Amino acid sequence: MKLLYVEIEHNGRRKKYKCNSFLKNFIAFLLSPSTGLKLVDMEGVKRSPTPEFYLRYSRYCKGGGWTRCRFDWVTTTGSKITNISFLAPEGDSSYGILIGSSNNPFSYDDYKLYQQYYHSDTEVYYHATVHSKEDNILQIRRSFENKSASDIVVEEIGLAIKYDGKYYLLIRDLVPYTIPPGETISVRYYVEI
C-alpha cells in the first residue's frame, strides 16, 4: 500500500501536496497480529487488534474514470469484518478525513491531530466517500464548509478509522490551507493498493 498524495479542491482549482505520512498506527493496524504492535487510539490508550485483515473490493470498479466503490475489510481466512470504517457520515468529526489548525511537526508516533476542528454550526464536516480508478488506486474524499464570518486556517489533515468502537489516526500531513468564510473545500487522499 502506498500513499500517493493529498489534494485540495477549492473553487474548481486543485492543488496536490506530497505526503509520506503513514503513522506507526498504520503499521500496527496492518501487522499487529503477527508482530505484537499495539494501536494507540485517539485518547492515547494502547490497544491490541485481534484478526489479521486486508482490504478487498466487494465489487471491482472498472472503467476509465473515477467510480464510486464499495469494499470490505476481510480476515486472512476470507470472512468479512464489519467493525472497521473510515467513511464517516456527515456531521461526524471523530473519524474519516479530519482537519486541524496545528503546524506541529509530523511525528511517526502521532496518534491524533494536535488541534482538530470539530463539526459545529460554523465548521461543517460532510460525509466521506471512496472512489476507485484502475482497480488499484483509492481516492478517499471529504468536504468541509466554513459557515463562520472569518477564515478557517487549516494546517494539518489526517485520516482516522473507526475500529471496534474506537478511533485511530493512521495518516497525518501538514498541509497549510485557508478556507474563506462561506466557502467549501474538498480534501482527497490518493492511496495505491
Image (cartoon, grey):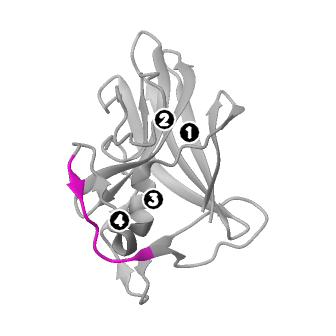
Q: Earlier in the sequence, mark 4 or mark 2?
A: 4
Mark-to-mark CA distance, 4 and 1: 21 Å
Q: In terms of secondary structure, where does tag 1 sit?
A: strand
Q: Amino acid at mark 4?
A: Ile
Given contact means CB atoms under 8 Å apart, are the residues at marks 1 and 2 in contact? yes
Q: Is residue 104 magenta?
A: no
The nearer-to-camera label among 1 and 2 is 2
Q: In terms of secondary structure, where does tag 2 sit?
A: strand
The nearer-to-camera label among 1 and 3 is 3
Q: Amino acid at mark 3?
A: Ile
Quadrant location, the C terminus:
bottom right
Q: Residues within 10 Å of mark 4 (few under 14, many from 20)?
A: some
Q: Is residue 64 above or below residue 178?
A: below
Residue segment shown in magenta: 45-53
Q: Is residue 53 above or below residue 150?
A: below
Residue visible at 42% across and 68% down in the picture: 31
Q: Earlier in the sequence, mark 4 or mark 1?
A: 4
Q: In terms of secondary structure, where does tag 4 sit?
A: strand
Q: Earlier in the sequence, mark 1 or mark 3?
A: 3
Q: Residues within 10 Å of mark 3 (few under 14, many from 20)?
A: some
Instruction: Write down the residue under mark 3.
Output: 27
Q: Earlier in the sequence, mark 1 or mark 2?
A: 2
Q: Is residue 30 above or below residue 162?
A: below
Instruction: Write down the residue under mark 1.
Output: 187
Instruction: Write down the residue under mark 2.
Output: 157
